[in-house]
Amino acid sequence: MDHLGCYNVTMLNPNRIWQTGNVLKSELPIIAIQLTWGAMMSRLFFFAYKPLHQPRLIAQISVGILLTYPFLGKFQSIYGFIYPVEGVLNIEVLAHFGLVFYAFLTGLEMNLDTILHAKKKAVSIAAAGIIFPMVVAPGLYYLHRILYKSDPHERLTIMEESSISGYLIWTLVLTVTGFPVVAHTLSELKLLYTGLGKNAITAAMISDTYSWILFMLLIPFSTIGEKAVYSVASTVVFVFVCIFLVRPILVRIIDRKTENGEWDDEELLYVVMGVLVCSLITDVLGTHSIVGAFVYGLILPHGRFADHVISVSDDFAGGFFVPLYFNGSGMRLLFTSMFLQVHWPFTGLIVLLLCTLKIVSTLFTTFFFGMRIQDGLSLGLILNSKGAMALIMLAMAWDRQIFLIPTYAVAASAAVLMTMVVAPIINIVYKPRKRFEQNKLKTIQKLRVDAELRILACVHNNRHATGMISLIESFNATRLSPMHVFALFLVELTGRGAALVAAHMAQPISQVGEQNLTKSQAEFESINHTFQSLAEAYDAVRVQALNVVSAYATIHEDIYNAANEKRTSLILLPFHKHLTSEASLETTSVAYKDINQNVIQGAPCSVGIFVDRDFGLLPKTDIRILMLFVGGPDDREALAVAWRMAGHPGIQLSVVRVLLFDDAAEVDTTHHGEAQGILNAVMDSEKQKELDDEYVSAFRLTAVNNDDSISYSEVDVHNGEEIPMVLNKLDKLACDLYIVGQGNCRSSRVFSSLLEWCDCFELGVIGDILASNNFGSRASVLVVQQYGYGGMVLGKNLKHATANIDGFETLVVKAE
């Protein structure tokens, strides 16, 4: 088997490690090449796998597989250049250092409060996922050995001797669930904040904790034999000393320094030294160095300090050293060895059976909790994801020759296959083909007067929360028409996603000391208190604070899911600019603008973008609202919002309808196509005008004639130049809040032309003018888009999505 990437050499190091004639010339170039290769290729594979939502672990293993015989491994010159014999020892040291630090960061990201206060369902699912594989897996290992021993080609049946150690490690590998991998998968699939996702993430964290306990208690029996009892006992003593003696001291010191902001790079070096010291202790005790690193991470204060340590160390540890270790795992994985014996179809069957153990146990457990089979199957698939722990145990079995090539290939192939197939299968099977059901109650206009108004208020910080509350108060909640507000704190997913997810799993987290909170946790607590004050002030308002941890590029999908799950009629979004002391709007974050544009294109209910010019500072007894009605579904929705607000005793509403004549009334036919374009456009325009007249007439008859605080007027516009002039005249009325429609499905050519000059397309023409610093208004602006007409299309042509010609009340369902 000379084609395998193995080294058959004896290495002597009489001059001590790394001490040579010229380190910079002989050692450093090799290390630099290996680090560059591992980091660069891992990133390339990660981006290649991104459409399949694969975790980084799979990308790092793939780099190692690339160097096996069927691929680059058969080119000895390439293999020898990347991994020469003289560089093996150095790279093994760095890889092991990366593994130790990986275990330390894993301990830091574990949320013990969630584990200790987990519900019975999550605990039962995690326990079943460990017990069932431990019962069945030994039989599959025995069957695997029988298949290889019965092969007539003795040369190809090199098997390890049967031992308890082999059975033990084989079984433990199958019980593992990788919490960081599960967190990444759920976040990528946008299932993290669904009922399924919450069950899965909690069960995964509990299962991962059980895996570490089993690793600490059982692995020594497979590696050091009879002395394992002393090793385990001493390691247990070490853990208790760390938790009950070392931890109180460290927590007191670290909390004081964190609260006073006294940390610097030199002091953080002592933290790293603590990782190495604890790793050395457990390595000497005979367990494994990663146990000490994990326990050390677990006992350190979680929150702001852990967030700081992870942010400064994850790049070099996770980006450079950790890939080296998992590259090595991939280099050992020789898929071809499974096909070198006559019973390879049965070996493939064993691999598939290994992949079903956790699925079967989860299905059995979820059945007793009354969960659907579909949910149980999806949960079992997710918990089948393997992480670093499984690969570490397999590497130990390889290094100590507990597993030889065939057994390692079968077990590792099963672990990799389990992890790889989870995301694609869940994406196809579990997620519904149609994301949102057709429901006219997802608009304010169609909501019954006595129905509960459900609002999803998205915020990035407490300043947004304060402004949103002032706007929500204007909706005039009463016992006849109550409100349920869901405050959604949007957190950007960066660095180690599992750590951030774990930090935000407990909601709220007030029981944690204020000095322990991360920046995002502290912000969430502040937002939660701000919104709870709204619930305390109004009996007819219920409030629930939520958070979403996701990449900004895809966080709009989490907003969709939250709105759909909570059955909201309106999503409120903060504008991406804030008011400065000079009374001008200044960009807070361009990413916020991208989020708003993404949300408004496919939201499952109506959407409002709030341009806040200190609306919360106004007295609630005298608020003047001006609603501009031009026409179209968005304007009808905006009028519905203003109509609801008009019931507030401290609000005066003025509705101004803009009537288009001459050039301004010319219909835009460009987005209807050449064939019958003019006819369709005219029919669309006439139908929309009929609906506008009908709704405005109902408003005037019901509201204006019966309430002195509501007024209605009309203004004529004959061309595009008159629109800014009209807005300037209206602004002299000194209103406090403008409510306007975004302009979707508005068929006027004038507005289509003006849209090309907008800086913020998500606000539409009128909203963009009112929010411009050049316009000079001091009033806040609420831009409304009605659900059911496809959402605004933001592209090069800047055209609107059109409604169905056959029926304007037909709702559009966005398919995935």
Image (spheres, helix red, strand yellow):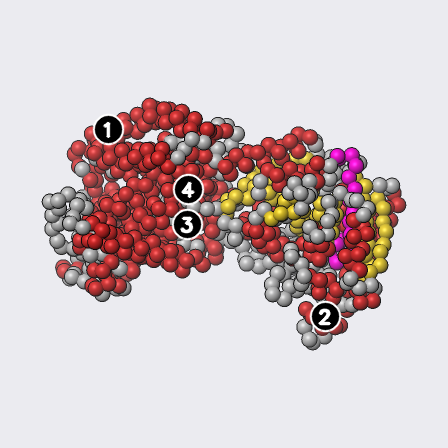
Tags 3 and 4 touching, CB below 8 Å: no
Residue type at tag 4: Ser
Task: Tell which tag, 1 or 2, sits nearer the viewer.
Answer: 2
436 and 732: which is toward the camera: 732
Is the residue under label 1 in contact with that under label 4 (CB below 8 Å)?
no
The percent coordinates of residue 298 (x first, y second) are: 37, 33
Q: Which mark is residue 311?
A: 4
Label 1, secondary structure: give it. Answer: helix
* Other-residue count near label 4 (Cα within 10 Å), few / some / many at <14 / 14–19 / ≥20: few
The disc, 4 or 1, on the residue closer to the chain's N-terminal end is 1
Q: Calculate the distance from the C-alpha at mark 1 to the C-alpha at mark 3.
A: 37 Å
Q: Which residue range is magenta in the image? A: 619-637
Which is nearer the N-term, disc 3 or disc 4?
Answer: 4
Binning the other alpha carbons within 10 Å of mark 2 as few (below 14), some (14 to 19) or many (20 upward) gives some
Horizontal side, residue 148 vs residue 584: left or right: left
Task: Indicate which disc, 1 or 2, sits on the residue closer to the N terminus.
Answer: 1
User: Which residue appears at 13% of the width and 49% of the height?
Assistant: 11
**Can see residue 644?**
no
Mark 3 neighbour class, 10 Å CA radius: few under 14, some 14 to 19, many 20 or more = many
At 77% across and 39% down in the image, what residue appears? Answer: 623
**In the displayed structure, does residue 650 sit left or right of residue 538?**
right
Mark 4 or 2: in front is 4
Q: Label 4 to label 2, Cα distance in Å?
A: 53 Å
Q: Residues within 10 Å of mark 1 (few under 14, many from 20)?
A: some
**For mark 3, what is the residue?**
381
Disc number placed over residue 234 in the picture, else none: 1
Mark 1, mark 3: which one is toward the viewer? 1
